[in-house]
Amino acid sequence: MAIEAVPEYREYTNAERWIIVVALMLGSIMMIVDTSIVNVAIPTMMGTLGATLTQISWVSTGYIIAAVIMLPLTGWFSARFGRKRFLTASIILFTTASFLCGISHGLNELVIYRVLQGIGGAALMSTAQVVLLEIFPPQQIGMVQAIFGVGMMAGPAIGPTLGGWITTNYNWPWIFFINLPIGIAAAILTYLFVHDSHLQKRRDGGVDFIGIGLLAIGLGCLQTMLEKGNSEGWFESNFVCVLTFFAVAGLTAFVFWELHTPHPAVNLRVLRHRSFTAGTLYATILGMGLFGGIFILPVFLQNLRHYTPMQSGMMMLPAAIATAIIMPVVGKLTGRFSSRNLVAIGSIGFIISTMMLTTLTMDTGYTQMFLPLVLRGMAMALLFVPLTLATLVGLPGQEIADGTGLFNLARQLGGSIGIAVLTTFVDHRTNFHRSILLEHISIYNPIALQRLQALQHFFQSKGASLMAARAQALYVIDGTVRGQAALISFSDAFILVSAIFLIAMPLLLFLRKGVPGGRGPHVPAGE
């Protein structure tokens, strides 16, 4: 396909472009921060709403499921209703749902409004990227995606810290109310300055209700399975088995239907582009590293080191700051070096930083964690922008929206898979290491016996009887063993993440060569 005679970016002045960047960044940051900000307020919500932990978890699960289902549909909605109207309506829906979440008086209300948030939030991430790819000249795309990426990469780290501060100083409804001024400003700016794309063909065919329904069943069941699998015991649970069946059946039928219907809701034919397919698969690995890594480290800090959510959030802050600082640098580098090579460098940096975290101990403090976290933040910046460009820049103009939705879906599902896999892996490895360590705890081990007697004497000195002192001493030793087993299992988890990245690196050979500035975003990649 030839380059458009009148590229879309010529329709905008430079000032209009940067106003749009601000509007879209505001919306995207809201969506990403709201993915994690709620988690810190869960205990407070349980008390206010009178809900159990299982019930309240749907506040997070409902939001993510709705966003996951909507992500691949954003291209269809954008083409059906026009990019400007769809994006503005999504921001308004997200903002309105945020207000309704804040005034909710019951759990059912809150879950419903969180689902509406997720539906509105999908476009804030996916369609926003499409707009930025199309309204800027090719030589500026790398820098703009880098600036946009600051919010997307820093959001998961900022969310828990911000949520902890708001919950501590105010109350949980304010984690939703803070979206109101941001959302109103983003909606107004988007409506005033964003135009409909002339590259995207308007889809006036019938609505693909069957495809949308199959997608909702397949992705909804898959995401629920990933969210609930570990707590339900995975395939020992009939609930998980049923979810797995409907996820596989729904997605299989969805793929078959979309490839044969004349007006598909999701254009899966975009996967014919080799570079896009490879980049989308690698985005799944990136999601595992980003969201899985951000999930597992706070769990270590809070469960083993007994940090508060606020303290663990502050511990993660250096990585977010490093990402924000290095992103503009990466934006400039994408105009001079191949995106594929930059992704490779970022992958190696991520592997090194993750392996550095395998040396964590019970005494590891802020100073020892600073370097690996900063290195990881820099590596994620090198991964995010170049991978996005290498995957999306070569798509024909009318397929960019479809491709962006699938690309972001892959990253989101990668995060869900990463969290599910790592949670289960840590639990199983903790039991494994605990059983090994217990083999060395016996009366025939002089060190263990000495420790037992010292603890027993200590509790007896506090007034405990001989039997009570012995029971308390055994409880302390068992707690030490469990802590050490968990510590080793976290180290194993970091090794697993590094190994997954290493195994996936050959996918980079299939990414397109060259730099974005050398070719417009609407030129095929030549696969």
Image (cartoon, rainbow, N blue to C red):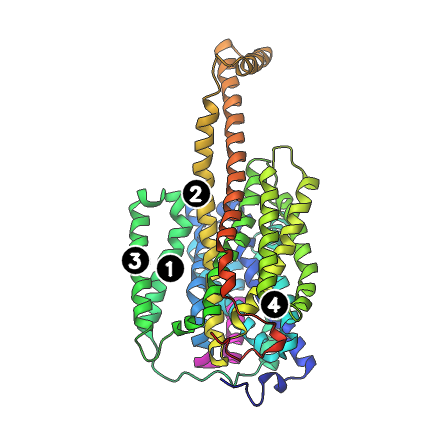
Mark 1 crowd level (few <14, some 14–19, many ≥20, 10 Å Cα): many
Mark 4 crowd level (few <14, some 14–19, many ≥20, 10 Å Cα): some
Relative height, residue 197 to residue 485 (above, below): below
Question: Can you name the residue that lies furthest to the top here?
Answer: 466
**Residue 176, quarter of picture:** bottom right
Circle on res. 424: 2
Is residue 204 found inside the magenta-colored segment of the image? Answer: no
SS for tag 3? Answer: helix
Q: Position of residue 316 (x, y in %)?
A: 63, 48
Residues at marks 4 and 2, CA–CA distance in whole angstroms: 37 Å
In the rendered structure, the answer to whether residue 22 lies left or right of residue 464 reads: right
Residues at marks 1 and 4, CA–CA distance in whole angstroms: 37 Å
Of circles 1 and 4, the one toward us is 4
Of circles 1 and 2, the one toward us is 2
Q: Where is residue 320 in the image (x, y as percent from the top left)?
A: 65, 54
Mark 3 crowd level (few <14, some 14–19, many ≥20, 10 Å Cα): some
Q: Where is residue 366 in the image (x, y as percent from the top left)?
A: 68, 41
Specify which label sits upstream in the sequence, 3 or 2: 3
Amino acid type of the residue that numbered disc 3 sits on in the rendered structure = Phe
Amino acid type of the residue that numbered disc 4 sits on in the rendered structure = Ser
